[in-house]
Amino acid sequence: MQTIFDTQSNERFIYHFNPEENSIEMQTKDLEISYGKTLAMQHADIQFKKNTITALIGPSGSGKSTFLRALNRMNDDVATVKGQILYQGVNINQPGIDVYEVRRRIGMVFQRPNPFAKSIYDNVTFALQRRGVHNKKVLDEVVETTLKQAAVWDQVKDSLHKSALSLSGGQAQRVCIARVLAVKPDVLLLDEPASALDPVSTSQLEQTLRELKPNYTIIIVTHNMQQAARLSDYTVFFNLGEAIEYNKTRKIFTRPKIQLTDDYVSGNFG
Amino acid sequence: MNRMQKQSQVAMGLLRAIAGFVVLILAFLIGYIFITGLPNISWKFLTSPAKAFSAGGGIGIQLFNSFYLLILAMLISLPIALGASIYLNEYAKDNWFTSTIRTAIEILSSLPSVVVGLFGFLLFVVQYNFGFSIISGALTLTIFNLPLLTRNIEEALASVADDQRQGGLGLGLSKYETIIHIVVPAALPGIISGIILCSGRVFGEAAALIYTAGQSAPALNFADWNPFNIDSPLSPLRPAETLAVHIWKINSEGIMPDLTKVSSGSAAVLVLAILIFNLSARYIGRKVFEKMTSMD
């Protein structure tokens, strides 16, 4: 384990893994994201360890969602992203990279459940069908496996061919997770996935994410600090478009190294 | 009661009166047309051909022409409007080019239909030598219909939440796949309502057709459905007076003895058809939406 203090400023603490001992799934280097002429994110050199849950926290406008959306290039049309985004050692932020393949391997679940106006079955299998998988046996199996992984199988197994728009928020969100799992990603990006859900659905969702952790690398933006503390192994604290502190979640919430982090997690601002 | 409460009550009463007045005019118009027209409608009236000099003529051919022209015009304009609205809503950036397109569509939609009709006359009837024909009429109706249909479909697409698009892209689908397979199906209820509403407008249009589809309804041989024969109902090159044009024509130069009866009967059929279009637009749009969102 090796830690580096940022040399430019003492107000940042970014934890760095030793790559020889840890498997790093994703990493950002010299990342700079801007909307037009406005710089929205800088100084965010973060490594994401394989099969862990990393929470991105910070006040509104701190750039955490912007950062998350850069990781699978969902920001391509709206923002300019400079620097490197390494996925399994390959810089995916360069021309010639198949952005569709990037988004398949680095799946994303959104703030509001957004099932398509199709049946539950078609929601899950749609992307596979577009990729030419039409074997019903294969598709049936994917539907069952992924809905089980997303812990929603028991509730929807008898209504697979009914519209996904009729599901409750919590069920819809887990169908959306199954939909992402169906294309077999390695990384799951979640942008405040529980913000539109009630407490029971939220806790079920968190349990689902814990169960997914052994097989996926999960990065989750959350406004809810208890959620970050309960769920994640590592936490990044963002403020005003910079990563201020990155450390084990336990340390962020008990002994933060930066005063600003302390102020935020103890509710003094945000 | 204080002054503000009183003010609010007076304003509310005034607005109610204005709204009521508008409804009253509409009710009076429709009521008048139905009361004078509906008694003249019979199965024979709806199916038999018109007579120029004697009583007892019907509107069969005109009715068929109206629907045939409507279907042709929709077949031509729907793909164009769909493409244009997808481009404008999904791809177009906010720049001078797209704002020019939007302005053009607005101007086109505010053109008086008689101007569109004369344009169609000069271009299709005279220049392209299509004559007074179904095809000239359908192409002219397309010009008349395109701006509104494009607008309606664009609005339906715009009402689809952005997170549907994000969801598609987030699964590694291309933008095109996302639009065609996710956004357009989600907008379907709105698109269908838009198409039906436009159908009502096209169905009742007269001025654009007088000089393009013509003012005569030659006898048709309903046993012959080969579009290449000139007396076939499907022939695109035959002249085709529609119901709306028929009403205009018999009122300006009709000489049959039962003129008023034919005229008010035709008007009632026309208004009834448009009412059905409008009501079914809502109904079908809602049904499709329910079917897409329901559990069973």
Image: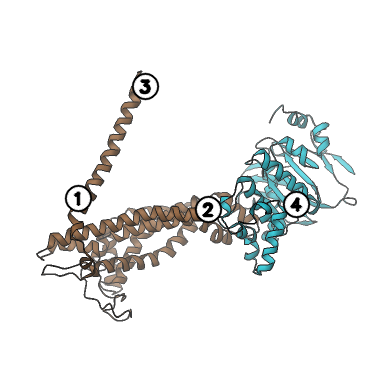
Chain colours: A cyan, B brown
Is residue B130 visible from the viewing direction of this image?
yes
Q: Give the x, y percent position of residue A210.
A: 77, 47
Residue at the top extreme? B2
Give the alpha-carbon distance from disc 1 to disc 3, as whole Å. Answer: 42 Å
Of the numbered discs 2 and 1, the one sitting upstream in the chain is 1
The amino acid type, in three-letter code, at marker 4 is Gln
Q: Residue at x 16, y 68 (%)?
A: B57
Q: Amino acid at mark 3?
A: Met
Alpha carbon distance from label 4 to label 2: 45 Å
User: Mark 2 falls within which chain?
Assistant: B
Q: Mark 1 and mark 3, same subunit?
A: yes
Place residue A180 in its image quadrant.
bottom right
Read off the residue under disc 2.
Answer: B294
Chain hosting mark 3: B
What residue is disc 3 on? B4
Q: Are marks 3 and 4 on the same chain?
A: no
Residue type, label 1:
Tyr
Which residue lies under the disc numbered 1? B32
SS state under label 1: helix
Of the numbered discs 2 and 3, the one sitting upstream in the chain is: 3
